Image (spheres, rainbow, N blue to C red):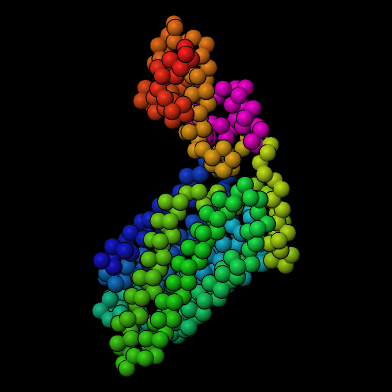
Amino acid sequence: MVEIIFIGSIFCSLITAYLLLFRKISYQTLSDYTLAFFLICNSYCVLSYLLLVSNWIIEVPLFYKTGAPINYLIPPLGYLYVRSILRNEKLTQKKDLWHFVPFLIFVINYLPFYLMPYQQKNQLVHAVTQDLSMNYLSKDGLFPEYLNYILRPLQVGIYVIFQWKLLINFKKTSLDNPFIVQTNAVLKWLKVFTWANSGVFFSFIIIILFVVEAPQLNTALDFIPSTPSIFYAAMLLLISSYLITHPEVFVGLPYIKKKLPVTDSNFKPEEISTTTDFENEIQLIEQYFNNNTPFLQSNISINDVSVALGIPARSLSFILNNHFQQRFTDFINTYRIRYVNEKISAGYLNEFTIESLANSAGFSSKSTFHAAFKKVNQCTPKEFESSLAN
């Protein structure tokens, strides 16, 4: 059962990371990359543990201990992701490199093991699979292995505090009311994300308390390997599932298109200006659809409209969802049905069939046309034509 959770979490998180990195039809943002690498690092660490407890590590001994330094990338990536969303950051800052010093230290720490001859490393991995306590008591690096069980919880706890501080200090009242729905959706996601990270920290606390209370160290060591890894796997499954089922959070907060020169030293949430409310883009969209009638193309996509208007597809989707309160397909079909209504009112059906009219309006199938027509007009085409006669 536990293995299923591990495999499921790895699969879902890698799918989500792929969507963040490669399936965008517009520009990438710093937050997308940060979250993608956060998910990838977590997946690798969970996979490393799965290989160890399942004894599959015997087949790939070179992977042993490679996930240990990567654990120190996860907390800062989580913090930087939340910060990049709340502060609309577009570029990394040089001083952020300090967040990754622990990772570099532990890479150096394990260099003697990484450079160990293959035969010797293979023997060690076989020994570890026979007794997992060796994974926690052996001295594979320059530092004692137990140092991980002090520094990792400490690092996770510090960055969880940083994340909650960002969320608490963020003043959502500084955002325009027309975008409050999107704002609340993104803030809810960031709280879910931060609670998931908090759960990992609590798992470390449980381990520490258990070890202190355990009458025998061996009993504690039986408990140590599973708890944080299960929490990591559960966290991955939670946040990747949430993202897949709530794709609107990818757009970010309503000031997504503003470029704010934000640094830690001068940033004040209350100073965020969101006077930019997409008025120019809204006007451009309406003019384009009224004057160019792109909706008459049967295979038109949001990417086609994005390129034609010079508006990033994510921003275009955000405007349609929040200002016009329609998905792209419904928005297109609304214009098509208006076109159909005008044609019927002008007597089009006196010479041509309803199927011909549907095709000319850009509908690819009869069923799609009738569903869209009824959704907009609350009646069938024949009923609409009869109402005009009356």
Q: Which residues are magenta?
A: 281-309
Q: Is residue 286 left or right of residue 209?
A: right
From the top left corner, tell me how far across and down residue 11 is, in percent: 36, 56
**Quarter occupied by residue 269:** bottom right
| Residue 35 drawn above or below residue 293 | below
Q: Nearer the viewer, residue 125 or 200?
A: 200
Q: Is residue 33 above or below residue 370?
A: below
> Which quadrant of the figure has residue 159?
bottom right
Q: Quadrant of residue 314?
A: top right
Residue at left offset 41%, top offset 65%: 235
Numbered marks: total: 0
The residue drawn where x is 55% and y is 50% is 181
Q: Quadrant of the N terminus?
A: bottom left
For the residue pair 79 and 72, the one nearer the viewer reads as: 79
Magenta: main secondary structure: helix
In this orientation, does residue 115 appear? no
Percent position of residue 131, x then y:
27, 81
- The residue shown at (56%, 69%) is 164
Report x, y in % for residue 230.
35, 70
Residue 147 rendering spot, x and y as whole percentages: 47, 84
User: Outermost residue toward the bottom?
Assistant: 215
The residue lying at 60 percent from left, 62 percent from top is 83
Q: In this view of the protein, which residue sits in the foreground, 302 or 70?
A: 302
Find out whether residue 231 is within the magenta segment.
no
